[in-house]
Amino acid sequence: MGEELYLSYSSAFLIGLLGSTHCLSMCGGISASLSMALPVGKGFRLRQTFLLLAFNGGRIGSYTLIAALIALLSTSAAGNWTQLGPVLRTLAGILLILMGLSMGQWWQGIRYVERVGAPIWKRLSPLTKHVLPVHHVRQALALGALWGWLPCGLVYSTLGWAALQPTVGSAAATMMFFGLGTLPSMLATGYAATWIRKLREQRHFRQFAGLLLIGFGVWTLPITAMMH
C-alpha cells in the first residue's frame, strides 16, 4: 500500500508539473496581477513572495478540500467498491486522455467537461470582488481559495484519479501533491519569468506533455490494470 501511494503522489505531482502550461492559461493571469498590484519599492520582492505563496496556498487548499469531499461521497455512495472502482478508473483514465489531447493541441474536447463546474463557479466568482484588489496576505489566500473552484479540465482529470484512492486522506493528499506540481510555474508567472512563457509556446514540449498525460490515462484504465 505504501509503495502504491508513493507512486500515486509522485505521479500526481508530475501531472501537475506537466500540466503547468494549462495552468498558466487558467490562473497565470491572476497570479501575475498580484505582483502588478504592489508598488515597487523597499520590500517589494518579499511582499510579492508572500502574496504569491498565499494565493497558491489557497488554491491548493481548495483542490485538497474538493478531493476530500468527492472521496467522502464516493465511499458513502458505494455499496460495493468492486463495482464502483472500475467506473471511477474509466472516468479518470478518459479525463486524463482528454487532457493530454488538449495539452498536445490535438483536440479540445476537455472544454466540454469543464462546463460541468460552471454553475458552481457562477455562484462563487462574484465573491472575488470582495478581495480585489489584493494588498494583504489574507486577501490573496481568500482569492486563491475561491480560484481553486474555477472549472479546469486538468483539475477534474486529477480529481477523477484522486477518487480512486482507498481513503479520504490519501485522496486529499493526491490533490495536494498535484497542486504542488503546478506551483513552480505559477510562482514563475508571478515573477514574470520569460522562460515560462516561452515554454508554454513550445509546440514540442506541449506535445510531449500531452503524450505523457495520455499515457497516464491509458495506465489508469481498468483494462490496463487487469493486464498488470
Image: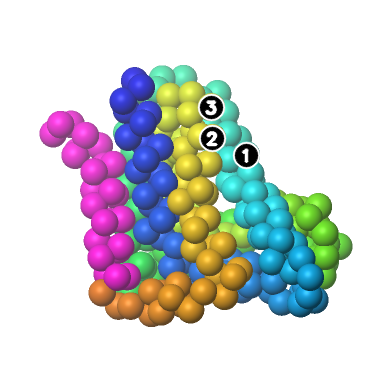
Verify CB contact (< 8 Å) between mark 3 and mark 2. Answer: yes
Q: Quick one: quadrant of the N terminus? A: top left
Verify CB contact (< 8 Å) between mark 3 and mark 1. Answer: no
Q: Which residue is mark 1?
A: 65
Say what amino acid the circle numbered 3 marks: Gly
Q: Nearer the viewer, residue 131 or 215?
A: 131
Q: Which residue is mark 3?
A: 169
Q: Is residue 125 visible?
A: no
Instruction: Give the mark nearest the N terminus, 1 or 2.
Output: 1
Verify CB contact (< 8 Å) between mark 1 and mark 2. Answer: yes
| Crowdedness near tag 1: few (<14), some (14–19) or many (≥20) residues, C-alpha within 10 Å | some
Q: Give the percent coordinates (x, y) of residue 77.
A: 53, 26
Residue 78: within the magenta?
no
Q: Give the percent coordinates (x, y) of residue 67.
A: 55, 39
Q: Secondary structure at mark 3?
A: helix
Residue 210: within the magenta?
yes
Magenta residues, as a range? 205-228
Name the residue rendered at 53%, 27% in the picture. 169
Vertical position of residue 201 compared to residue 3: above or below: below
